[in-house]
Image (tube, grey):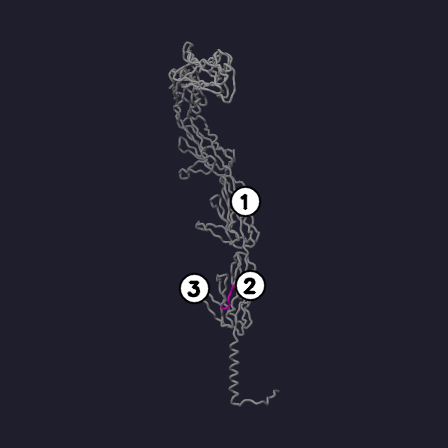
Amino acid sequence: MVRRSTQYRPRSWRWPALATAIVLWLTAATVAHAMPDLVLSEILCDPADPVDGEGVTIYLTVTNQGDETVTTDFWVPVWVEESFIGSLKVTQDLDPAEPTTYGSLTIGWTAAPSDHSISAKADGGHTDIWGNWVDVDLVAEADETNNELEVILSVPWPDLIVSDIAMSPPAPVDGQSTTIYLTVRNQGPGGLVRNFWVPTWVDEDCIGWVQVSQDLDPGESTTYGSLTIGWTAIPGDHSVYATADGGHKDVWGNWVNVDLVMESDEFNNVFSRDLGSSWSDLVVTALASDPPNPEPGQPVTFTATIRNAGDGATTRDFWVPILIDGGYHDSKKITKDLLPGFDDTIAFNPWTAAEGSHEVCVEADGGHKDIWGNWVNVNLVAESDEANNEHCLSVFWPQIGVEPTSLSFVVGERGGRPAAETDAVATIWASRLLTVQNVGTGALHVEDIVGLPSGWLLAAPTSFLVLPGESRSVTVYADTSAPAGGTLEIHSDDPLTPMVVVPVAVEAQTWFEDDDPAVDYTGPWQPYTNPACSDGHLKYSNTPGSWCTLDFYGTGITWSTATGPMMGQARVYLDGGYAAQVDLYRPALGLTPLGRTGLASGWHTLAIVVGPEKNPSSTDYIVAVDAFEVLP
């Protein structure tokens, strides 16, 4: 029960008006404070610790912390750093203190390494169907300044390296199919789920690229054998290198230099290793015909032996053509792997022998004819020597060889005399053997030998027959009384070399050491060695009346002798006549040239006699002979 108050109340005409005013004021105050207030109460990421390239789901929670229910749809835009990634539309009515249902507001993002700012705004804008930004504010709130929330998400950095390049086989040879195994390791603190490319080069040539789709945790490497590239080995020293997270070629063959993975170190992606492959060298070691001397019209089978003379093997197929008289006859393909020093023998299709001489040539790693009969000049094997692949054979073909290739005599040389000559003849004779060989496969006819200098003789017929593999020697007699020269010509039926020229010459000796047999000593002469002397030695005598003589051919002569405090005097005679007396005394030792020029060209005799006189200051009678030089 409510007790009434006995206190004075206003007059009844004033009470209704006051009550109405109070009610209106209370209503107005209530309306002013009953408003919603939207806030981003939570931003969560799943996974909470993402790695590079991993899909991240961002969960947003919006709470109405106002006094009035939100019944209007509104938008929640989301940013990562400054990049807008999307807007979510909230259609849920939110009573006071009610949050949006967990999981109803989600947006996806692909993680990249760095510290990222993820922010969202309740009742923010969105983009329209044309992609234009619409900055709307659909909900009237008690506080319009607390709609945003920002969180920081750290994504650690990966770091990709090519940790190994392996080969199978480890030491490939020329033409061998080789598998290159690549291993990529993530040595960074952050994981990786992105796909990326690994291109590989041999020297400057990109031989391929592989895509890595394996997730790589920190410290994890790709599975061995999952990244392979094929290559056909070629000889030489090579550099093989690969780049983690490099480029590739698109379907049109254009190079795409992409960098798909953000790393802590972008400069350590390349890894290389050196690879050496030895060179092969293909040569034809033998070429034979069966029968070896066929008759015209007879079938002939040629066989050739191909050898790898190099240091490295080859597994490549190659062709060996045979040409007869420069024309293509046949070719065979060698498919056998040739190790260093190994051979393979092949037989060509028969050839019908034709009359006459023929040249047959075989070339290792040469060309062949295709199915249309067109010549294909291929070179399939890279070799250390590309110039020694050919070998030729002369069939029914003589080939001349001459030994020696020149004849040289010395003026005054003696040795051999034609049988028809007698001692009464003043000619000085010397002889040499000249050998004519037949190194071909057909009989060689020497038709003539001409061109001998005047007075020279041959002790054999100038025409004769030499069978294959045999030789014939001819004695050449030279008159060595005086210098002479010329060319001796040998004419034969060798189709390649019908004439062989042999230079011949008689030349005067221009230098004589003291011990040359041409220097004749009479009396006691002693040897003496000293590096200052010609050839390190000389001869001397201190016995008066001792002498030496030298017959020479020329126009002058220089006598190299010693001078010094013990030297005597020499009497010099030329061609039997007294020429001079030379005092060899000098206060100091030395070597002195003494000479005479202007003589008539021909034979001369020099004589040096140890004199009975000496310089009063000299201590002995010594006369020395070091060397003689003749002027031609």
Q: Nearer the viewer, residue 155 or 592?
A: 592
Q: Is mark 3 on a helix, strand or loop?
A: loop
Q: Is residue 562 visible?
A: no
- Expressed as whole percent of the image width and height from the top left, the position of residue 390 reads 44, 32
Mark pair 3, 1: CA separation: 53 Å
For marks 3 and 1 on the same chain, the one whose residue lies earlier in the sequence: 3
Q: Earlier in the sequence, mark 1 or mark 2?
A: 2
Query: Mark 3 vs mark 2: which is more N-terminal?
Result: 2
Q: Which amino acid does label 1 sit on?
A: Ala
Q: Mark 1 points at which residue?
A: 166
Badge number at residue 44 = 2
Question: The N terminus lies in which quarter of the figure?
Answer: bottom right
**Local crowd size for mark 2, using a 10 Å CA cut-off: few (<14), some (14–19), many (≥20):** some
Q: Is the magenta stretch mostly helix, strand or loop?
A: strand
- Left or right relative to 352: residue 242: right
Q: Which of marks 1 and 2 is in front?
A: 2
Q: Residue furthest top?
A: 424
Task: List the single residue furthest toward the front.
Answer: 616
Residue 291 marker:
none
Q: How many marks do you count on the picture? A: 3
Pointer 1 with pointer 2, Cβ within 8 A: no
Image-quadrant location for residue 43: bottom right
Image vertical order of residue 137 relative to residue 488, above or below: below
Amino acid type of the residue tagged 3 in the rendering: Trp
Range shown magenta: 119-123
Q: Tag on residue 130?
A: 3
Nearest-to-viewer mark from 3 and 2: 2
In the depicted structure, whether residue 218 falls above or below residue 240: below
Instruction: Tell whether position 483 is magenta.
Output: no
